[in-house]
Structure formats: structure tokens, C-alpha cells
């Protein structure tokens, strides 16, 4: 079975998780005190008591404020998740995992098994414990493929748990507790959807941590980072589209929208880094391309910054994130102007044959046309190129300075030397280029360089989670095929019927498998007299469990009975008058509990494990039934997919 990583391994990261868990507990306690004080404040009419309570409330609120600030500082410990390589990469923003409380499902699941399924619940303790161990392991997934698979495996098991134990009308009465990833505020819900949504959130968060720790100095690491951030965007987007009414802020539509945009921006930044690795140094067109890539990164980070500063998001997102995103948008704007200047000043002037292609690229390069001579003249005149290059550098330097100023406003970011280094390196590089091309005798006023048109060679993809990549077997498989034995179906207690074969066989027609259905009962035949009805399912033959049996197996068991006859166990679904009334849809749709916006997230994978969630097989053609005739019993074809016995 899958293992979580050891939560006590004293690595930097687990120390971080421990501190977060501790702060979460303290926040929990303060929230309880606040609730108590607020209730007392409302209830009392005594003026003196009111004053005391108001004082206590202000203490609690300021404590909460401090705890949240401490948590924010932890959430900004980006360096713990960055790689250890020597080369400088701009830090990325990873998300911390949501913490959850332990959960004991032994009693609720056992009660449900005995009440709903009529089974001896003690026989299912092993499966329940296995499920709980899986939940325990998924609380501390390792930061690699195995950790992702562990979360997927648990998520897929929840799909089965939902179908088996969560009827549409009631809950198990268990609360699922999860802490907000950013504020540490606790929330709880009885809806299994909250558990599913939180696991999905952690899947996204784990992808961000994997993305942030890649060494982006070389192509393999860059491609892995791109993939990880695209998958993270996909998980958050999937959560946003398939779940709603989340009890915690981190899973609200506004937050998820912001997180998807942040991940897309981080992908775009990696694409820029990839292009810098692939671009040839001295090529004019390649330099223009880099400038446009940088402008694209600036563009997406501006959008993220806008999203983060909206009313419902601003007070919730760590200030260090808002600052980081703002710094990056200014930094990449500066880079776009820097690379424009390099293209103009460092690359050789075009030959006649290169000119048309360069002219075409330059035509779409600026947002508005630069003032001065025509493009053709500009491209062929080194002095004109130097002038425009100088204007671009002037703008670059202004933007570098703005990026450094914003960076300096945030205490947490000031501690991040890597970012500081990157910003000042880029600034110095632009300054030295400027002084190199600046002539003492320049008497012209350096013009205003137009901005660069954003354009990318690799558009970020939002990759939705592929749940089918981790195959799981329904832990509660022994309860029988989900098409019948699910939380939403009800059936009458099992009946045992004794049958003897008459001259014309047993007098019923069978259809489908797992479980086999009695499709018709001949009036006056043996089956009718024994009390079998159309729509009954055969669950045992002579005490052998037949819930999962194929058509031919059941026929074989019936065929091998002698004079003494056969004992058949059957159940009838409640509300089924013959097979027509039985719900023919695939079972396994989620109970539409509290938080689900729709059942899209389940119906898509209700056949994830075809063996355990077969459709009601009798509503489609059964391949086997034609073969299931045997000598000695008169056979008549009643329909093309059922046989009479």
C-alpha cells in the first residue's frame, strides 16, 4: 500500500508543515474563544460584562491577526521549496498543502454496512482500516510522482466511498475538517464533496511545490517546471468548474481563478527562460522574439496582479505574493525593452536578402510605430538603430528601478536575496549597456520608446487531472456490483427460494450478469410457484455467492442441480416493478451534497473502474447469454439476449 512521507522527518519542509499545523491549532483555539465571547456579548444585557467581553474580543482579534501574519510569513517561505542549484533562477510561488484532522470512520461505516447492506459489519473491518490508512498516508504526500499518485488514489477511492456509503438524502454524520491553505482558518462539512475538493486542492498545491523545486537552469528542469505548473493550473481549474459553495476561502471561485492565473503566469515565465536558453546570441529576429516573450510574461503577471488586488482577494492573499507578482510584471517589462535595445544595437545590420523578413517582424514588434524614419531606413541605419535602442534602454532602466522600489516595500521579500540579486543584476546590465551606447556628443532628446507587442512561441496549457492514470480497485468490492449495491438503491431483505426443475425447466428467463437478472417468469411454472418474480436478482445459488457471477457461471450452477433441486437467494430492488422501472443509468453519481455544483466530476469517471461500476448489464446486449443453452433443457429464444431455462 502507498506510504505518505514521514511527517516527522526533520527536513526544512516538514519543519515548515509542523509550524503551520501548530499555528492552525492555535488559530482554531482563538476562533473558538472568539465565538464564545461573541455569543456572550450578544446575550448579556449587563453593561459591565459587555465591557469586559469587548476587551477580551479585542485581545482575541489581535492574537488572530498575529497568528495570520506568522502564517503568511511561513506561506512565503518560498526558498524552502526552491532548488539547491548554484545558478540563479527567479523564485516561483509554491502553495502549502491544506492540513486536515484525523478521521475515524470505523463505527459510521460499520453501522451503514449492517443497516443498509444487511451484512455482518465486523467482516468489513479490514477494508475500513485500509481506507483509513490510505487517508492517513495522503496527509503527508512526498513531493514527487509517488505523492501525486497517492493523492489520486485516495481521490479515486472517495468516488467509490461516495457511491457505497453516501445516499442522496442523508450523510454519514461524520465531519470532514480541513484548514485553509493560506489563512489557517478551520472549516468543516459533512459533505464528502468537501473532502474531495480539498484533496484536489492538495493535488494542485503539490504540483506547485514540484514545479518550484525544479532546477530551471537547463532544459529538462524547465520542461518539468512547465509541466508541473500546467498541471497545477488544471487541478485548480477543475476544482473551480466542478465544485461550488466551498466553506473555505482558498477554494472559493475568486481564489481559484487567481491561482489558475498565477500558475499560467509561472508557466509563461518558464517559457521565457526556455527561449533564452534556445535563442542564438547574435540573431536580430531571435532577440526581437525574446523581447516579445518578456512582454508576454509582463502581460500575464499584470493580469494576476489585477486579480490579486480585487476586493475579495486582496485581504486574503499574502502581501508578499501580491508584491512578488507586481515586481515580476515590472521586471519583465524592463527585460522586454532591454532585449529590444540589444536587437537594435548588438545585432549586425540586415543584408539586402534579410531585410524583407526583418522588416515584416519589426512591423508587428511595437504596440505603436516608433517616431522617426521609415522602417527600412531605420533597420539599415546604425545611428537610427542606436537612437531607438537608447530610448528602449531608458525605459528599461526606469522599469528596473520601479521593480526594485516595489520589492523594497515588502519586509518578507527583502529577506529573499535571490530575487534581490536577479533584479540588481538586470538593472546593472541595462545601465552598462546604456553607458556603452551613450555618446557624449548626443544632443538629441531621447524619445519615448513604444511598448513591445506581447507574443509567445508556446502558449501555456491548462491540463486537467487525469484520474484514470491511477487505477484503483473498489475497497468495498465484496458488497457486490455497484450497479445494484450502492447507497442510493434500496432493496427488500434477501429471500431464499427452493426450486425443483419441472418438465419445462425452471420456468424463467435470465438476462445479463453481475448480478444475473430474472427477466421473466412463466405463469404456472416452477419459478412462479416458488415465488420468484420478474426483476429479482440472483445473489446466491446453493449458498455460493453469485453477486459478481457471469451469466454462464450461474447457468452452470443451475444446470448441475439434481433431483433435490436448488436453493436460490434473490433480492428485489424497492420501487422496481419488473426490470423496466429499475434505473438504467450508471450508478456512481455523487450525492449532490452541500458543495457540489454539478455531478460532472463523477459522471465522467463513473466507469473509471469498469469492473466495479458496471452499467446494469441487462440494459445492453449480453454477449454471453446466447452461448448459455445446454442439453436436456428445452431452450426457446425469448429475445435476442435472454434465454429461457
Image (cartoon, helix red, strand yellow):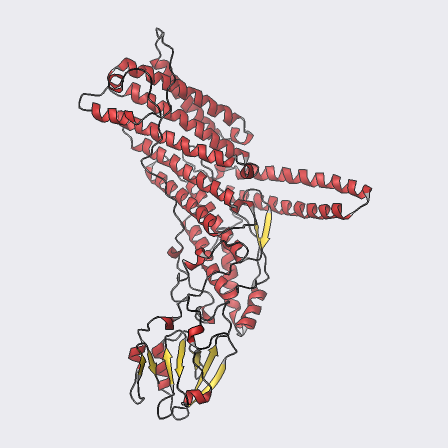
Above or below, comparing residue 423 to residue 492 in the picture: above
Q: Is residue 198 above or below residue 420?
A: below
Q: Position of residue 310 (x, y in %)?
A: 53, 36
Q: Position of residue 574 (x, y in %)?
A: 50, 74
Residue 254, image x and y in percent?
Answer: 51, 42
Please state, as top left, top right, bottom left or bottom right, where the C terminus lies in the image: bottom left
User: Against 280, is 482 above or below?
Assistant: below
Depth check: 87 or 434 in front?
434
Question: Dividing the picture into quarters, in which one does residue 182 lie?
Answer: top right
When asked about the image quadrant of residue 619, the answer is: bottom left
Q: Quadrant of the N terminus?
A: bottom left
Q: Residue at x 35, y 41 (%)?
A: 223
The front one of 471 and 442 is 442
Name the side, left or right, on which 315 lies relative to 562.
Answer: right
Q: Is residue 362 left or right of residue 582?
A: left
- Is 548 left or right of 188, judged from the image as shown? left
Point 52% across, 60% down: residue: 132
Residue 278 locus on image (x, y percent):
29, 33
Q: Is residue 547 left or right of residue 180?
A: left
Considering every residue shown, the one lying at the far left of the view is 353
Amino acid at each position: 500500500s502507498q506510504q505518505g512521507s514521514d511527517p516527522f522527518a526533520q527536513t526544512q519542509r516538514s519543519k515548515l508543515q509542523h509550524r503551520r499545523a501548530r499555528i492552525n491549532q492555535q488559530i482554531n483555539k482563538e476562533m473558538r474563544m472568539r465565538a464564545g465571547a461573541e455569543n456572550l456579548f450578544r446575550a448579556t444585557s449587563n453593561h459591565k460584562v459587555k465591557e469586559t467581553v469587548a476587551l477580551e474580543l479585542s485581545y482575541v482579534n489581535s492574537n488572530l491577526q498575529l497568528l495570520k501574519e506568522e502564517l503568511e510569513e511561513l506561506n512565503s517561505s518560498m526558498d524552502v521549496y526552491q532548488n539547491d542549484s548554484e545558478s540563479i533562477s527567479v523564485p516561483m510561488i509554491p502553495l502549502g498543502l491544506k492540513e486536515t484532522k484525523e478521521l475515524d470512520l470505523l463505527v459510521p461505516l460499520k453501522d451503514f454496512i449492517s443497516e443498509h447492506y444487511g451484512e455482518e459489519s465486523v467482516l468489513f473491518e479490514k477494508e475500513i482500516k485500509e481506507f483509513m490508512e490510505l487517508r492517513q498516508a495522503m496527509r503527508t504526500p512526498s513531493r514527487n510522482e509517488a505523492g501525486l499518485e497517492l493523492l489520486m488514489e485516495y481521490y479515486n477511492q472517495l468516488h467509490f466511498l461516495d457511491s457505497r456509503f453516501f445516499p442522496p438524502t442523508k450523510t454519514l454524520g461524520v465531519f470532514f475538517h480541513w484548514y485553509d491553505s493560506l489563512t489557517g482558518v478551520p472549516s468543516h462539512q459533512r459533505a464528502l464533496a468537501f473532502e474531495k475538493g480539498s484533496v484536489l486542492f492538495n493535488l494542485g498545491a503539490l504540483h506547485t511545490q514540484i514545479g518550484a523545486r525544479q532546477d530551471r537552469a537547463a532544459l529538462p528542469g524547465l520542461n518539468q517546471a512547465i509541466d508541473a505548473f500546467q498541471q497545477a493550473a488544471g487541478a485548480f481549474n477543475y476544482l473551480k468548474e466542478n465544485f461550488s459553495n466551498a466553506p473555505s476561502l482558498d477554494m472559493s471561485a475568486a481564489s481559484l481563478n487567481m491561482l489558475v492565473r498565477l500558475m499560467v503566469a509561472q508557466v509563461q515565465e518558464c517559457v521565457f527562460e526556455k527561449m533564452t536558453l534556445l535563442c542564438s546570441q547574435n540573431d536580430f529576429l531571435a532577440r526581437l522574439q525574446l523581447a516579445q516573450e518578456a512582454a508576454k510574461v509582463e502581460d500575464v503577471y499584470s493580469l494576476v496582479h489585477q486579480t490579486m488586488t480585487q476586493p475579495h482577494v486582496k485581504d486574503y492573499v499574502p502581501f508578499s505574493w501580491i508584491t512578488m507578482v507586481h515586481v515580476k510584471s515590472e521586471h519583465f517589462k524592463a527585460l522586454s525593452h532591454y532585449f529590444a535595445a540589444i536587437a537594435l544595437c548588438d545585432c549586425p545590420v540586415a543584408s539586402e536578402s534579410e531585410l524583407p523578413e526583418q522588416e515584416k517582424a519589426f512591423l508587428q514588434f511595437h504596440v505603436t510605430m516608433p517616431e522617426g524614419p521609415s522602417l527600412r531606413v531605420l533597420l539599415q541605419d546604425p545611428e537610427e538603430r542606436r537612437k531607438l535602442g537608447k530610448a528602449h534602454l531608458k525605459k528599461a532602466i526606469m522599469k528596473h528601478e520601479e521593480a526594485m522600489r516595489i520589492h523594497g516595500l515588502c519586509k518578507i521579500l527583502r529577506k529573499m536575496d535571490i530575487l534581490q540579486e536577479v533584479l540588481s543584476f538586470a538593472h546593472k546590465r541595462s545601465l552598462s549597456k546604456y553607458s556603452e551606447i551613450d555618446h557624449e556628443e548626443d544632443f538629441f532628446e531621447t524619445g519615448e520608446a513604444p511598448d513591445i507587442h506581447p507574443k509567445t512561441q508556446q502558449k501555456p496549457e491548462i491540463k486537467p487531472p487525469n484520474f484514470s492514470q491511477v487505477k484503483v480497485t473498489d475497497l468495498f468490492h465484496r458488497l457486490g456490483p455497484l450497479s445494484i449495491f450502492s447507497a442510493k438503491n434500496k432493496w427488500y431483505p434477501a429471500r431464499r427460494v427452493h426450486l425443483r426443475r419441472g418438465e419445462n425447466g425452471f420456468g424463467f428467463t435470465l438476462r445479463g450478469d453481475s448480478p444475473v437478472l430474472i427477466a421473466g417468469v412463466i405463469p404456472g411454472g416452477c419459478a412462479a410457484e416458488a415465488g420468484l418474480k420478474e426483476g429479482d436478482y440472483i445473489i446466491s445459488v446453493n449458498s455460493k455467492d453469485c453477486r459478481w457471477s457471469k451469466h454462464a457461471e450461474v447457468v452452470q450452477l443451475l444446470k448441475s442441480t439434481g433431483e433435490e433441486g436448488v436453493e436460490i437467494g434473490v433480492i428485489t430492488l424497492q420501487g422496481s416493478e419488473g426490470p423496466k422501472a429499475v434505473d438504467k443509468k450508471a450508478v456512481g453519481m455523487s450525492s449532490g451534497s452541500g458543495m457540489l455544483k454539478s455531478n460532472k466530476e463523477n459522471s465522467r469517471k463513473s466507469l473509471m473502474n469498469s469492473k466495479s461500476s458496471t452499467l446494469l448489464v441487462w440494459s445492453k446486449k449480453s454477449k454471453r447469454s446466447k452461448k448459455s443453452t445446454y442439453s436436456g433443457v428445452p431452450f426457446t429464444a425469448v429475445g435476442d439476449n435472454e434465454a429461457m431455462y
